[in-house]
Amino acid sequence: MPSRAHLLVVDDEANTLASLSRAFRLAGHEATVCDNAVKALELAKAQKFDLIFSDVVMPGKDGLTLLEDLKQQGVAAPVVMMSGQAHIEMAVRATRLGALDFLEKPISTDKLLLTVENALKLQRLESENRQLRQRLGKHEIVWHGEAMRRVMAQLERVAASETRVCILGETGTGKELVARTIHERSARAAGPFVTLNCAAVPAELIESELFGHEKGSFTGASGRHIGKFEQADRGTIFLDEIGDMPLNMQAKLLRVLEEGEVERVGGDKPVAVEVRVIVATHRDLEARVREEKFRQDLFHRIYVFPLLLPPLRERRDDIPALVEHFAAQVCAQNGWKAVPFTADAISALKLHSWPGNVRELRNMVERLMLLAIDGEVDITTVQLALPKAISGTPDSVTIGTGALANRVQSFEREVILAELKRSHHNMSLAAKALGLERSHLYKKAEQLGIDLRALRREHE
C-alpha cells in the first residue's frame, strides 16, 4: 500500500468533517467527506478507498447499518467506527459486523493518524499473505495420472456453468479444494467463496450460521448477525458434509434453493440472495434418502452434477508430484532449504494405503522432512515415520481358491465390494463404474451374498 491513503469520512457534523479532513490532508492523505450514509454507500461503491471512517449516530441510516450495507455490497475497504456516545454493546456489535476499529470521540490527531497507519500496515500484510499463498499454490490441484485427468475434465466443464455440484469422496481427498477451484474458474471468481461444515456446527446453531439472526432473537443475540448465504451473495457457498445436516434444516435449505431468499432468525422479512451452491459429502445420499435421513426433494436439488474424487490409493501415480508440491510448500513456510526425496523413498510412499488420503500425505511429507537424514529423505527416513510402507503392498483384489467357478464368483464379489467402498456405497456410481445397470448390480450383489444394508450400516 502507498503511504498516501485515500480516505472516506462520514459524519453528519460539518465541524467534525472539516477537522478530520484537515488533519488527514496535513498528514499527506486524500480525504473525501460525506454527511450521510446513503451517499457514503454510493461513493464507496463507485470509488476505491483505502479506509473508511464513519460516525455511528446519524439521522436516517446510522453508521452500523452503513457498515452492514458496505459488507453486503462487497466493499473491500476496512471501516473504522466513531462515536461520542460509545458503549460496550455498540463496540461489540460493530466488531461483529466487521469493523476494523472503534474510536471514541473526541479523537486526538495522533490517535487518528496511528489508526490509518495501522490499517495500511494490515492491508500490506494481507496482500503479502495472498501473494505468498499464490506462490505456494495453496489452491492448486496437483495431479498426473488418469484418475484425476477425468476429474479435472469434468471440473473444467462444470465450472463454466451455474450447475449445482455434489462432490463425493473420502475424508482428506480435497473436496473443499475442488469446490474452491470450481469457484475460481467460474464467472463468480470475483465474488466471495464462503464455506460451512454442516457436521461441525451444533444443530441448534446451524440455522443462525446459514441464514443469520436479528438482535434479541434468542439468548445471547446482542446484535444482528449476517449468515453464510448473505455473505456469499453473488459468489459461491460450499456446504461440506451436507449428508449430516439435520432434517429440519434441510427443509429450510430447500426453501432457500427454490426461492432465492433467506430469512434471518427473528426476522420478519426475506432477504434476496444470488448464490451458487456446491455441496460435498462422504456419505451415500441415495441410501440416506431411502432411510428417510435425507429429504428426497433436497437430494434432487443438490445432486445435479455428482463429482467423485478418487482416494489417494487409487491415484498412486500422483504421489511423486504431490510429494514435490508439499515439500516446496513446507520449505517456503518454514524458510528451509530444499530437502530431496530419494527414488526408493517415493516408491515406499506409493506402497502405503493412505487412509487419510492427500491430507495425510501432506502431514507425512512435513514429518519426513523433519526426520531427514543427511539432508535427504530416503527409505530409512520413511521406515522411521511409516514402517508399514516398507513391508506393505498395494491394496489388491483376492481371486479365491478352488474350482474356476468359485474363483470367478470370489473375484466378482471382491470387485463389487471394492467398487462399493470406493464410491461410498453409492449404487448408481458403482454401477456406472462397473458398466452395469443399477438393477443388475442389485441382482448381482444378491446372487453373490452381499448384504448391502449391512454394508451401509457399517459404512455409517
Image (tube, rainbow, N blue to C red):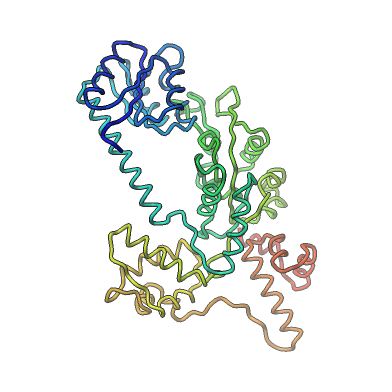
User: Does residue 383 appear to the left or right of 446 in the view shown?
Assistant: left
- Which percent across, then down, holds residue 211? 55, 33
Look at the image and tell me in which quarter the C terminus lies. bottom right
Figure disc tally: 0
100 shown above or below 90: below
Q: Quarter of the image holding residue 41?
A: top left
Q: Which of 252 and 109 is in front in this view?
A: 109
Foreground pick, 57 / 299: 57
In the rendered view, would you say 240 is above or below 34?
below
| Left or right placement of residue 220 versus residue 261 in this view | left
| Image spot of residue 284 (x, y percent) | 65, 56
- Residue 51 position, x and y percent, is 34, 29
Quick one: which residue is furthest to the left in this view?
Answer: 110
Q: Quadrant of residue 89?
A: top left
Could you tell me which residue is drawn at 55 percent across and 45 percent down? Answer: 238
Residue 428, compared with residue 279, is above or below; it is: below
Q: In the figure, residue 340 lies in which quadrant?
A: bottom left
Instruction: Give percent across and percent down for residue 20.
Output: 27, 19
Task: State which quarter of the image contains the N terminus.
Answer: top left
From the viewer's perspective, is residue 354 above or below residue 192? below
